[in-house]
Amino acid sequence: MEAASYKGTNKMITGIVFGVISFWLFAQSVVNVVPAVQEDLGISLGTLNIAIGLSALFSGLFIVAAGGLADKIGRKKMTYIGLILSVIGSFCLVIAQGSVLLIIGRILQGLSAACIMPATIALMKAYFEGAERQRALSYWSIGSWGGSGAASFAGGAIATSMGWRWIFIFCIIFSLLGMWLLRDTPESKGESSGAFKFDYTGLLVFIITMVALNIVITYGSDFGWTSLITIALTIVTIIGAIVFYRIEKGKEVVLIDFSLFKNKPYSGATISNFLLNAIAGTLVVANTYVQLGRGFSPFQSGMLSLGYLVAVLAMIRVGEKILQKAGAKSPMIWGSLITTVGVAIMGLTFLPDFAYTVVVFIGFALFGLGLGVYATPSTDTSVSNAPSNKVGEAAGVYKMASSLGGAFGVAISATVFTSISAAGNLELAATAGIIVNVLFGVLSILSIIFMVPRDAGKTHVEEGDVPTPGQPQPSH
């Protein structure tokens, strides 16, 4: 079928969701099976933690480049490359007998995520319009935002009943099913003229900068924040960022087109996405505190966040419906506000055990409810405000904001909690760590208020209104 006449189908949506879920199966599930993997492979905890972190690192390093590449060589082709890498990476983990194949597999899985995430968003922008695009992005969000919680529970259940390697056998099955379901989807590319060109210099500077930043975020507290190595890496990060910006501003073919940020709705969606993902630090602080300060087992602390998973999955379609009726700004603000309130009440550490347990459960549920309302309006705002020939690149930057936000939030929250708890006051440490996340939430709300216009994302046309050319039309 010609790409120009092709309309996205439910089969296409399902294939994309399978691809996104395969990412979460290998990204999230490993965190739950650390002891089993360590014992089976006979490797040190330090080596295993490095292997786990490599997927996020390689995903973050290459997601923008992969998004830009998808616009040039084809979004379906890049999705297929990602799914093939997922199969090979997962197979490496299935047959691993030590650290070598584990590390290779995790690197390939990180590259897989970098290919899949922006390319699939770009495919949805290409083949769905208006309300149908928003519905498709809702399912993408269910796979992306809800997939982490679902894969976490599924991974634990699979590992307990069948063994941890079976997680990655399921990952291979989902990836192959995704490829099969997407086989009829025509190729989609951004409009371009002339020979293929790529910004290799920009990519090299970007990788050096991001590696330095990731090491500071991940290991800064281990090295010491004022140690020579942390200070040196911070300087490399700052200089690298300045050099990268100057290189990109002066070239025609670039890795990141900074003119994207001249679009205020896109900037508002991306910045608020970064800040709302930074609230992920709450998960670390709350789970650590209830185990150390309240005597919960890891299983009990996991059950506390069950409300989060249910709420985020239940509310994503609700966020989509609010988006279609009221535009993006309202659900983005309300979603961020509900999440921030949910986080804030977890800071009430002075409450007695039973009351605090109830408060944390409600807090997690509100956290998920808010994120569910926020997810589709935010993703749609970023996608619908990107130029059609740069959707992959724009989606890559948007998803990189998620990864960086989560990494920043966890690092800062964990540092605050660890520093204060070292003096022996766990309650104060938990409250301080939670306050950091509340501040992220407040900043997220402010970025939406000042940058996202009131009518962004509306798909219905009021009686008497005349739609402007290029405005998404309602799909009945």
Image: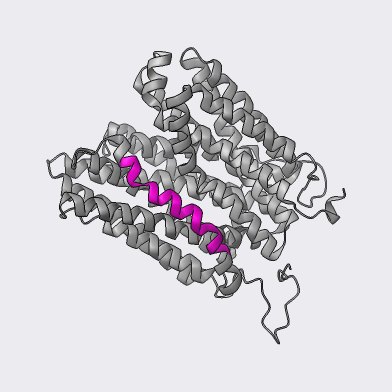
Q: Is residue 89 left or right of residue 98?
A: right
Q: Is residue 87 left or right of residue 428?
A: right
Query: Magenta stretch?
Result: 301-320
Q: Residue at x 38, y 58 (%)?
A: 366
Q: Above or below — where is 162 with respect to 248? A: above
Confirm whether the magenta stretch covers residue 3: no
Q: Is residue 196 visible?
A: yes
Q: Position of residue 109 (x, y in %)?
A: 56, 30
Q: Nearer the viewer, residue 96 or 197?
A: 96
Q: Position of residue 198 (x, y in %)?
A: 70, 40
Q: Residue at x 33, y 38 (%)?
A: 231
Q: Nearer the viewer, residue 245 or 133?
A: 133
Chief secondary structure of the magenta portion: helix
Q: Is residue 223 left or right of residue 56?
A: left
Q: Position of residue 415 (x, y in %)?
A: 27, 42
Q: Residue furthest bottom?
A: 464
Q: Residue at x 37, y 16 (%)?
A: 39
Q: Is residue 429 left or right of residue 251?
A: left
Q: Quadrant of the C terminus?
A: bottom right
